[in-house]
Image (cartoon, rainbow, N blue to C red):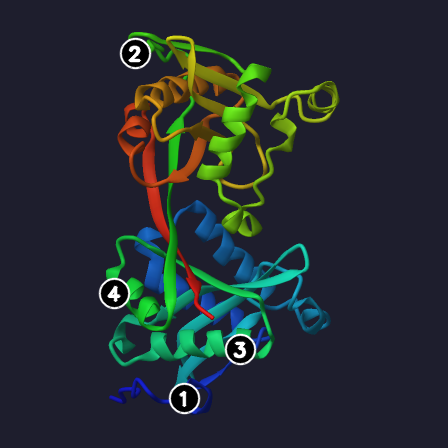
Amino acid sequence: MTIIPIAASAQTHPNLRPLNVLRDLSPVADLIETCFSSTMDQEGRQYLQEMRRSGNSFARWASRAVETTSLPLTGYVWEENGKIVGNVSLIPFRSGKKRIYLIANVAAHPDYRRRGIAWALTRRAVEHAREKNVGEIWLHVRDDNPGAFDLYRKLGFIERARRTSWQARAESGLPVQAASGIVVAGGSPADWRAQQAWLSMRYPDILSWHRGWSFHLLRPGVWNWLHRFFAVSNIRQWTALKGGELQAALAWMPNGNDESLFAAAGEESDPQALTALLLRARRDLSRFYSSVALEFPSGRFDDAIRAAGFNPLRTLIWMQATS
């Protein structure tokens, strides 16, 4: 068994090579499934299926697609005796004129762990991004994987956010009883300034490059109203007030990602107000959807979200490489 010295250059190790998209995608998908099957959700399984389907179809255009697709067309693998036992992917994003790389799919086969393979692959991915003069380098790791978190921290990544993905069934017969003193109503233009500030706090610009958050359609005004009416009329909004003061706001904005509910609440907001809004959304949206989803910062409002019948799917720690 070969242990990779912590100071060794990841570029020169004979077992580490660039990903070959013409022949590596399918075995890499198998490796990722082996490593993460116990924690993989439906989105992850669909991602692996797409990798396998695409593995045989890149011959003519892969070299031109490296910077324009979410599939892992750039990355590195660790190969021993003709078998891929380690992988790291580099997925490109753009935010305005700024280029960003997301390091993803860091995996080492269970039989080859504790040898420094994940460390060497991640370090090589960082080197690759810096060679390409990429503006920012990010990755995320589940909060129940402290070993990986420590590895990334030692490689110079710092924690920027912890966000939990939640899901609940939409149910028409759900009894909705707001806590004493809390009144749930539709959105009001008078509430927009506070809602906008809370949305900016809960869905920060620093991560918008990845999730594509955009709340301009929620802004009050006749043009936005007309646009919602003719183009995206399924946007819904609710607010919760206590003693006449806004406590929380909730918007339903289907956007093609897992999350479609966007919650806004301040540091002094009553958590029960958020519970009331989420319960109302589960009931009101049952006419159109079987389930509802939310992504929200981990912390003070976790119990309030659980009280509304939402189950946590995963909590991701978002980390950024220091310069």
Residue 145 quadrant: bottom left
User: How far is mark 2 from mark 3, CA to CA?
Assistant: 53 Å
User: How far is mark 1 from mark 2, CA to CA?
Assistant: 59 Å
Q: Of the numbered discs in the image, which one, if any, rests on residue 147?
A: 4
What residue is rendered at 37% in x and 70% in y?
Answer: 156
Mark earlier in primary sequence (2, 4): 4
Mark earlier in primary sequence (1, 2): 1
User: How far is mark 3 from mark 4, CA to CA?
Assistant: 23 Å
Mark earlier in primary sequence (3, 4): 3
Mark earlier in primary sequence (3, 1): 1
Q: Of the numbered discs in the image, which one, if any, rests on residue 128?
A: 3
Q: Is residue 308 left or right of residue 245?
A: left
Callout 4: few (<14), some (14-19), or many (20+) C-alpha neighbours within 10 Å? Answer: few
Q: Nearer the viewer, residue 138 or 69?
A: 138
Mark 2 and mark 4 in contact? Answer it, CB < 8 Å: no
Callout 3: few (<14), some (14-19), or many (20+) C-alpha neighbours within 10 Å? Answer: some
Q: Which residue is mark 2?
A: 179
Q: Is residue 66 visible?
A: yes
Q: Which residue is mark 1?
A: 9
The amino acid type of the residue labelled 1 equals Ser
Mark 1 and mark 2 in contact? Answer it, CB < 8 Å: no
What residue is rendered at 44% in x and 33% in y?
Answer: 293
The amino acid type of the residue labelled 3 equals His
The amino acid type of the residue labelled 4 equals Gly
Quadrant for the N terminus in the image: bottom left
The amino acid type of the residue labelled 2 equals Ala
Residue 110 quadrant: bottom left
